[in-house]
Amino acid sequence: MIQFFSENEFILSEEMHYEKWVSTIITSEGFSEGEISYIFCDDDYLLKLNKDYLDHDTLTDIITFNYNMGKQINSDIYISTERLTENAKDFHVSFEDELRRVMSHGILHLCGFNDKTPEEEETMREKENEKMKMFHVEQ
């Protein structure tokens, strides 16, 4: 089950479309869907989580907590809509495209993809682009 929550004013439109899309990403990587919660928040909320749980004192756009059980994806995924807005401006993309990139990024981490090395980062970007294109495919 994929659910969406907000700790700020952000409201995700087309929730059902996003739910089907995320589910498709998961199955396309050979995993099954468990309990997944996307929580949209602001920078301060995510910074506190970053400090409290990861001991990082930096702003970020996403924190993904992995509760996977074998090949079943289970997670709480926190996304700062403030960071998304800034990133969209910086990268000259729409907010919606940046949202989809970050949402798929979290799921790809849960599927075992990393982005610590230049090679891993390149693979992650390719996968993000592949998964973003899937959003526009009729579900």
Image (cartoon, grey):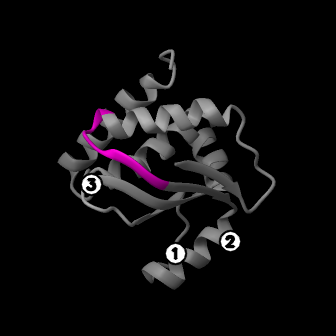
Q: CA distance from mark 2 to mark 3?
A: 25 Å
User: Considering the numbered disc 1 on the image, is that residue within a helix, a strand or a loop?
Assistant: helix
Q: Residue at x 30, y 33 (%)?
A: 28
Q: Confirm whether the magenta stretch covers residue 49.
A: no
9 vs 41, left or right, is right
Q: Is residue 33 magenta?
A: yes
In the image, 107: left or right of 100? left
Asked whether residue 91 is in view, the answer is no
Magenta residues, start to end: 28-35
Q: Identify the residue at the far left of this view.
A: 119
Instruction: Answer with left or right where residue 75 lies relative to residue 8.
Output: left
On the image, numbered disc 3 is attached to which residue?
A: 114
Residue placed most toward the observer, 130 or 60: 130
Determine crowd level at label 3: few under 14, some 14-19, many 20+ residues with C-alpha closer than 10 A.
some
Q: Amino acid at mark 2?
A: Asp
What x and y, as percent, mark residue 75? 45, 60
Q: Position of residue 7 (x, y in %)?
A: 73, 63
Point out the tag, 2 or 1, that comes first from the N-terminus.
2
Q: Give the residue pinned by disc 1.
A: 50
Element class at badge 3: loop
What residue type is disc 1 on?
A: Asn
- Circles 2 and 3, Cβ within 8 Å, touching? The answer is no
| Disc 1: CA contacts within 10 A as few (<14), some (14-19) or many (>=20) | some
Disc on res. 44: 2
Q: Residue at x 51, y 75 (%)?
A: 50
Mark earlier in primary sequence (3, 1): 1
